Each structure stands twice: as C-alpha cells, then as structure tokens.
Amino acid sequence: MFGYIYINEQELKLREYTTYRSFYCGLCQELHHRYGRRAQMVLNYDTTFLAILLTGLYEPETLFEEKRCLPHPVHRHAMAQNDAVSYAADMCVLLAYQKARDDWEDEHKLSGKTLSALLKSSYKKIADSYPRQSKAVEENIHLLHEVEKAWSDQQKGVGCVSDRAADLDYVAGLTGNFLAELFVWKEDIWQDDLRQIGFYLGKFIYLMDALEDIGKDYKKGNYNLFSVLLTSGDISGNGESGSAASGNTAPDSGTNLTEAIWQEPAKTEIQKVLTGMMTEASRAFERLPVLEYVPIIRNILYSGVWCKYSALQEKAGRQKGGGHDS
C-alpha cells in the first residue's frame, strides 16, 4: 500500500537530491540500528518524507555522516541522523507489521505471515511507546477488514447489504485516519496541520494503491474500491449512481477494468478526487513554519506524488495499444 510519496527526480537540483538520499539512507541505517537487518526490508519513501517534514518543522540537531552500507559497499554516502529519523523508523516498522499481518489475514500470503512474525517483538515495543499511533493503525485496519468482509459476503449472497464498500470518503479515510496520527510526532500547536497532511496523504495513498491493483484484485476476487464504484456507476463515490461512469455494470475482466478506469468520465473524476486530496495536504503544509528542506517537500507534494500516477496511465495506454511491458 505504501511507496507513493516520492520525489520527482527530474525537477530536483543535485544538492537537493543528495539531501533527500541522505534521509532515505539515514532511515535505512536507523532501521538496522534499532531493529536489525530484517527491518531494512520495510524501508519506504513515505516514511522518508515524514522524516524530512518533521526535521524541517522541528529542526532537531541533525548529523550527516559519510558511511558505507551493505547494499552500497564501495562508496561512502551521506546518512542523516536525528530524532525525527528515529521516529520515522519506528513508524515504518509499525506500518510494515500491520501491513504484513493484513496480507496474511486477507490473502493468506506466506510472505505476510513470515514478515509479521519477524517484526512482532519490535512492533510490541513500538506499540508500548506510541499507543496513540498503534491504536489508530489497528482500529482503522480492522474497520477496513470489516468493509472487505461485508463486500465479500455480499458477493457470496450472504450477510447484510452495506453501502460502505462504495463510500470513497469512508474507505479511503480509514487509511487517512491512521496516517494522520502517525504524522503527529508531538501533540503541540502544529498537530492539526500535521494531521491534515497525514490524513489526505493517507487517502491519496489508498486510492493510488486501488488504482494500481484494480486488475489484479479483480482476477483474485479481492475487494477494490474502484471496481465497486465502476459497478455502481458512481466513480466519484458521491452516492449518485450512474453519474460518473458509462453504465452500471463493471467490465467482465481485469484487463477491461484496467482500461475502463482510465477512460472518460472515470479518468477525470478520479484525477479530480486525487487532486483535491493533494491540494488539502499541500495547503496544510504551507501553513507550517518550515524553513529547511522546503524545495524537497514541495517537489514531493506538488510533483513527485504524480509520477506514479503518470506511470500507471502510460502503462494502461501501452496495454490498450497492444504494447507489452518488459
């Protein structure tokens, strides 16, 4: 689900890119230092962004050291170390554990079972240190499971009919709810704006993940918000059936679903929703008194987050045109 909050490398100056990499590598090093090499497997761009944002806001004493590491043993490279990076490492493991457990419980992925077992002891320590954050993740993932199970039961003709599965704001908001709490490092005067950033980034991440996985989820028979919305004829998720998609029946294959989601009017509706979410996240950031790393943060919020979207759109275009991905 994570890894969508990334930079647009083409728009960054070399010095800014080097600084970004120092936080990414510093987070990797901190995961190793705090939780062992197995924790480095869960390194992601989203918590790297969190580390940079919190460093820019709170300006903790930051040490940049030139080090070698196992993935890059030949040359030394800069690694940022501070309390915000340490916090981001904790949140990275917290998210990874819950994601792995979710993969096992939802799809019975052996990799999820293995990873959750490896991270379990580390997760317990983090949950004890950050009860607010861990509770938010657990509760909202549980609610998401309830939506998915209700939808699955409906497909099997059992259980009660629920409108939650087609409620875009509710379903995406569950990820937004727990990411909002993770973005609040300290409950102070900046917490409301940090929660807003985390909330809308969480919704954006959830929708991007659903957009990327729509074909795969269809083939596996898994719940996907966008396939539900295509079926209901309301891709905007506003409850007005038939208002945003051509017809009330989903395409009959994962490939056709992937094509349909990038066709009008669905394409415009989705882009409008995603843009609105990033607008709210960016608006909250601009209210914060951040002075350091502003070009990097703005690059991510205004440009970087759309790189994956563009890549998915291009991939859909190649598939529609009969091209093949390598």
Image (cartoon, rainbow, N blue to C red):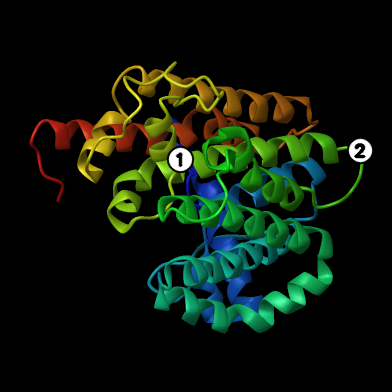
Between discs 1 and 2, the one toward the N terminus: 2
Residue 90 visible? The answer is: yes
Q: Report x, y in % for residue 267.
A: 36, 23
User: Is 44 located above or below residue 251 in the figure?
Assistant: below
Residue 227 in the image, given as x and y percentages of width and height: 38, 39
Question: Relative to residue 38, is residue 134 drawn left or right?
Answer: right
Q: Secondary structure at mark 2?
A: loop
Q: CA distance from mark 1 to mark 2?
A: 30 Å
Residue 25 location (% of width, % of height)? 53, 61
Q: Residue furthest left?
A: 322
Name the amino acid, label 1.
Met
Disc 1 element: helix
Q: Work out whether 280 lies above or below 300.
A: above
Left or right: where 5 falls relative to 126: left
Tag shown at residue 174: none
Q: Which residue in the protein does label 1 denote?
A: 208
Q: Amino acid at mark 2?
A: Ile
What residue is rendered at 83% in x and 70% in y? 129
Q: Residue at x 61, y 33 (%)?
A: 169
Determine whether label 1 and label 2 are within 8 Å by CB: no
Judging by the rendered image, the residue that carries numbered circle 2 is 189
Q: Is residue 15 visible?
A: no
Q: Position of residue 52 (x, y in %)?
A: 65, 47
